[in-house]
Image (cartoon, rainbow, N blue to C red):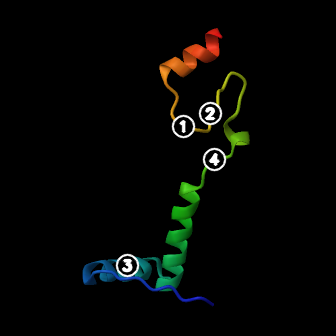
Amino acid sequence: MTTLTFKATAADAHAFRAAAQERRISFSEYARDTLRAAVEKEAPRKYNDIIRPGFVAIDGPPITSEDVYAALYD
């Protein structure tokens, strides 16, 4: 199994260990659970999840008012 290391202040290390102890799990389990939750929270939504009738999905650079006008009236 791969080992990850990171630097933390003494106060942060104490808080991490206390949080793991409060849940009655090892620090490793606490770190894995916390990191997995953070990754799942940041996972991008798939277009199938958000596309509905009348919904416009644009993937690209920001659109200006002139771009919208050109698309609607050309």
Residue highlighted by disc 1: 61
Helix, strand or loop status at disc 2? loop
Q: State the CA–CA distance, disc 1 to disc 2.
A: 9 Å
Kind of residue at disc 1: Pro
Evaluate if marks 2 and 4 touch, with contact meaning CB atoms under 8 Å apart. Answer: no
Kind of residue at disc 4: Arg
Q: State the CA–CA distance, disc 3 to disc 4.
A: 30 Å
Looking at the image, which residue is at 36% across and 80% down? 18
In primary-sequence order, the first of circles 3 and 4 is 3
Q: State the CA–CA distance, disc 1 to disc 3.
A: 40 Å
Looking at the image, which residue is at 65% across and 11% down? 74
Evaluate if marks 3 and 4 touch, with contact meaning CB atoms under 8 Å apart. Answer: no
List x then y, in percent, for residue 35: 51, 70
Rendered image quadrant of residue 47: top right
Which numbered disc, 3 or 2, marks the residue closer to the eye?
2
Q: Nearer the viewer, residue 54 or 71?
A: 71
- Disc 4 crowd rating (10 Å Cα; few below 14, some 14-19, many 20+) is few
Rendered image quadrant of residue 20: bottom left
In primary-sequence order, the first of circles 2 and 4 is 4
In primary-sequence order, the first of circles 3 and 2 is 3
Residue highlighted by disc 3: 16
